[in-house]
Image (spheres, rainbow, N blue to C red):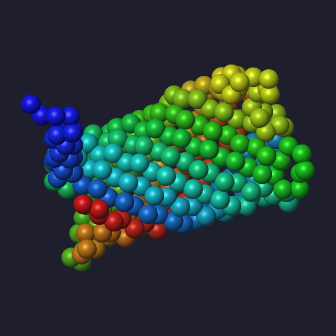
Amino acid sequence: MLNKPNRLIWIGFFCFFISLQAIAQSTGQLKLSTGVQKFANRDLGFSPLTYEGYRSISQATFSLDRPHKTECYQLGFAYGLLQNRIGNSMNVMSVGFMNQTFYHKNNPAEKRLQWGWSNQNVFNIRRHNGFSNYSLRYDYLSSIGPTARYMMPFQWKRQEFEWTTMTQVQVLGFQLKSGYIGADPEGFSKDNSPLDNFFQGMEPFLLGRDWHLGFSSSLDWDLPSDNSLGIRYQLDMSSLRGRQNVLGLGQSLLLVLTVKLW
């Protein structure tokens, strides 16, 4: 019989072999995107006025393509200065993580529509300039919903291109938002535990009352190195209702570099 160290070695070898088999049947890609975003925000818990401006935006997306399923993991960051119509300003930073899973047949590259699901996590933090008190505001959303994309490879002047259009709609989740004037959500108390504060401040996210929609359209040019260069337009709309309403609209134009990892 094998002793314990030898068993661990054989188990490790078996797991490594399975991992190699999985990699051999998949394709890994990394998309690096950067650009500019026109962003508008309205936080009715602080002011009825809309703040608008331009922000820098960057995203990194890892895509794992398997014979019947594609998984995408995206990390995004945006930062910029917004102003309202009377001249007041605020700095806005957004950090997001999104996971999308598309299901499809194992077909060669062709025109195809793919369906799946998505999980969206977005954290926005705002600091109103010119206010010494209650200047910090934030909101957080975690939700799930359906997603779809349409992919169309084509040739032009002996060059390979691919046009991709993608959309996602969030259906169910939860949200945390700053309360009226103050930074903490309503229901927060220093006497409560962090878990109690979470449940006191949490509100449901429900499609119909709340909205969070995403749309993007990109054109990629395949390079001889199996990588690609592209440009993408992206639209993000958010309406978080409940105790305090927070509205957001972002339109982005990004340059995209896609690197084939394996």
Q: Is residue 220 visible?
A: no
Q: Quadrant of residue 129?
A: bottom right
Q: Is residue 53 visible?
A: yes
Q: Quadrant of residue 142?
A: top right
Image check: 213 left or right of 175? left
At 74% from the left and 57% from the top, the residue drawn is 91
Decide which of 152, 19 is in the foreground and name it: 19
At 44% from the left and 63% from the top, the residue drawn is 32
Image x and y of residue 56, in percent: 61, 64
View extreme (left): residue: 1
Tell me: residue 40, above or below residue 240: below
Image x and y of residue 139, in percent: 67, 40
At 33% from the left and 65% from the top, the residue drawn is 259
At 29% from the left and 46% from the top, the residue drawn is 70
Number of labels in the image equals 0
Image check: 202 left or right of 13? right
Image check: 178 left or right of 25? right
Image x and y of residue 52, in percent: 72, 56
Decide which of 198, 60 is in the foreground and name it: 198
Decide which of 58, 241 is in the foreground and name it: 58
Tell me: residue 139, above or below residue 190: below
Quarter of the image where the C terminus is located: bottom left
Image x and y of residue 212, in percent: 55, 39
Quarter of the image where the N terminus is located: top left
Tell me: residue 229, above or below residue 169: below
